[in-house]
Image: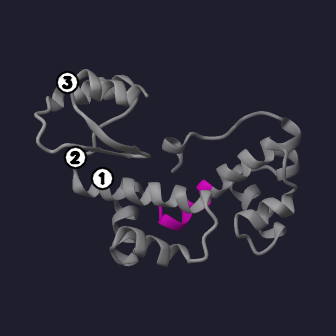
Amino acid sequence: MAILNVFNNQNIEVKTIQLGKITIDKKVEINYQKLDKQLKDLGFELIKDPVDTLIEKIKIKLIQYVENSNDNTIVTYLENEIGKSYTTLSKTFSKNEGITIEKYYINLKIEKVKELIQMQKLNFSEIAYTLNYKNSSHLAKQFKQITGMSMTDYKSLQIDTRKTLDKIV
């Protein structure tokens, strides 16, 4: 809503708004400096560079991949969704983010695990199944490797140490 208000205040008609993407009428004159400042005040930014746009698309698609069960491999999914070879996506992502797509994806999954543990609706095996792990021991090992604690310890702490999506690296 806050972003929509910024655009409405500048008389920019928003056609659609999605995670990381706003569609507007191209015929509208835009004061980009004013728009950029107002968005930055809210903690957002305009992405103008094509490489930055591609990186953001990859991140959004990875978030969607984690959120929705998918029959495709991550490679096939990204290639289909973005329309570029995985090699190109992987090299661009690694070069600009300093982390591989695979490691970023694992970090996203671990944050999702934390969320699911805090919701207390699923046991560890169900969480592993939901996130397409082969078994819960693989998830447990990965969780400990990333967080430094076991899933049981994390659950017993009952604290929210989740990272926001823009802080996952």
Mark 3 packing: few (<14 Cα in 10 Å), some, or many (20+)?
A: few
Q: Which residues fall within the magenta stretch? A: 99-108
Q: Please tell me which residue is depicted at 38% across the width and 62% down the height of the picture.
A: 93
Q: Position of residue 11 (x, y in %)?
A: 21, 26
Q: Position of residue 159 (x, y in %)?
A: 78, 33
Q: Compared to 164, does 81 lie above or below?
A: below
Q: Quadrant of residue 67?
A: bottom right
Q: Considering the numbered disc 1 on the image, is that residue within a helix, a strand or a loop?
A: helix
Q: Compared to 76, does 120 lie above or below?
A: above
Q: Please tell me which residue is depicted at 65% across the width and 49% down the height of the picture.
A: 111
Residue at the disc numbered 1? 52
Residue at the disc numbered 3? 34
Residue at the disc numbered 2? 48
Q: Amino acid at mark 3?
A: Lys
Q: Amino acid at mark 2?
A: Lys
**Disc 3 versus disc 1: distance between alpha carbons?**
21 Å
Q: Do callouts 2 and 1 mark residues in contact (Cβ within 8 Å)?
A: yes
The overriding secondary structure of the stretch rendered in magenta is helix
Q: Considering the numbered disc 3 on the image, is that residue within a helix, a strand or a loop?
A: helix
Looking at the image, residue 100 sits to the left or right of residue 135; the answer is left
Q: Compared to 21, does 88 lie above or below?
A: below
Looking at the image, residue 104 sits to the left or right of residue 134; the answer is left
Q: Do callouts 2 and 3 mark residues in contact (Cβ within 8 Å)?
A: no
Q: Amino acid at mark 1?
A: Asp
